Image: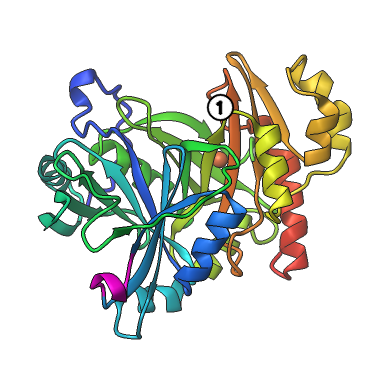
Amino acid sequence: MVQVDAPDTRPITEEGDFLQIRAVDHIHIYVGNAKQAMYYWWKGFGFKPVAYSGLETGNRDFASYVLESGKTRIIVSAPYGPSSPLASHHMVHGDGVKVIALEVGDAEQAFEVTTSRGAEAAWAPREEEDDFGVLRTSAIHTYGEVLHVFVDRSDYSGPFGPTYQPLDFEAESVGIASIDHIVGNVQLGKMDYWVNFYHQVMGFRQLLHFDDKDISTEYSALMSKVMENGNGRIKFPINEPAEGKRKSQIEEYLDFYMTPGAQHIAITTGDILDTVQKLQANGIEFLRVPDEYYEVLPDRVGEIQESIDAINELGILVDRDDEGYLLQIFSKPIQDRPTSFIEIIQRRGSRGFGKGNFQALFESLELEQQRRGNL
Ligand code: FE2
């Protein structure tokens, strides 16, 4: 494993972007019932099911659906029996993100460079072949039980990977475009370890830092550092709980997920009003801040293109910084355990993460925790 030294804060030069990650290739979620999870992402979030793997395609271990919206690709998979590794994962964690896959030009190089810099190997470079060509992957471990799989699709033209066959489903898009950031929750005292991991092993640099003065309420506090890769396309904030009077939202996550894991996936839209309206019509539930938030909003963020009334009605949050503003909203947990959730975000110049919304947001999160008896 990587050594836990003081974080290396040296800026990364062009040369230092040794991983050359092109994009998030996919997010693989292990679930209890892939057929029903597919329906949720399809009818709830407007993703189009594009590929399937299962008994009919020669996969006797698990059933799996690939869904896409814009550049966002989500896979949901469930085991066929108790001997599958997916079964033990699901028994401990419930539904949760197992893989954050990264598209690279050379999966072997990505594996060599990250493991030589201290990453723990999950699988060595391998080639899988079918009628669509050769798919090259390799994988390393990150926080909790999450893997980073490096994917090279340059010689593969299939809908996803070997054993996956195309699906022809119609979907009504809600406008979800691409992944903005994926947040990891780690244990108290472990944030800097994982910040250092992303820096040393993967060549990321620290973009921002929030401490408990930025993010604290009477009960809850957290610390967060945002790590960004060399070309700025990949952002992985890392959260750890901070000492508070009562149980923080990060501790609640860790208690129910049983290990560190992916807290939320933020996905972009070009029209958040339209997207959130459609999501709500589809039955997706979001956190709501108190109405007073909207009374002071015009003073706090100044002029914005969107109607404050429409924003208030949908429960969208707004934050402004030197570069512009952003609009965001957070779903309730997307499974029964209070673990992972989804953020919908539209950026109008701001590259921040909504620091001005933390207070209001955390208060409404605590209200939810209280309802669950977890505060
Ligand atoms: Fe976020």
Q: Is residue 55 magenta?
A: yes
Q: Is residue 286 visible?
A: no
Left/right placement of residue 332 relative to residue 2 reads right
Q: Is residue 317 above or below residue 47?
A: above
Measuring 72% from the left and 34% from the top, which residue is drawn there? Answer: 317
Question: What's drawn in magenta, residue-wise?
Answer: 53-59
Name the colour scheme: rainbow
For this orientation, the residue located farthest to the bottom is: 82
Q: Is residue 190 magenta?
A: no
Left/right placement of residue 310 relative to residue 258 reads right
Left/right placement of residue 320 relative to residue 307 reads left
Q: Is residue 152 above or below residue 162?
A: above
Give the residue at mark 1: 352
Q: Is residue 358 above or below residue 302?
A: below
Left/right placement of residue 169 relative to residue 98 reads right
**Quadrant of the displayed image that contains ligand 1:** top right
Q: Is residue 45 visible?
A: yes
Q: Secondary structure at mark 1?
A: loop
How far across and how far down the image is residue 235, in percent? 42, 35
Measuring 77% from the left and 15% from the top, which residue is drawn there? Answer: 302
How far across and how far down the image is residue 51, in percent? 36, 57
How far across and how far down the image is residue 279, in percent? 67, 47
Instruction: Please state, as top left, top right, bottom left or bottom right, where the C terminus lies in the image.
Output: bottom right
Instruction: Please state, as top left, top right, bottom left or bottom right, where the N terminus lies in the image.
Output: bottom left
Measuring 43% from the left and 74% from the top, which residue is drawn there? Answer: 90
Q: How many marks?
A: 1
Q: Is residue 103 above or below residue 17?
A: below
Measuring 59% from the left and 44% from the top, which residue is drawn there? Answer: 343
How far across and how far down the image is residue 99, in percent? 34, 56
In this orientation, which residue lies closer to the viewer: 154 or 240? 154
In this orientation, which residue lies closer to the viewer: 344 or 147? 344
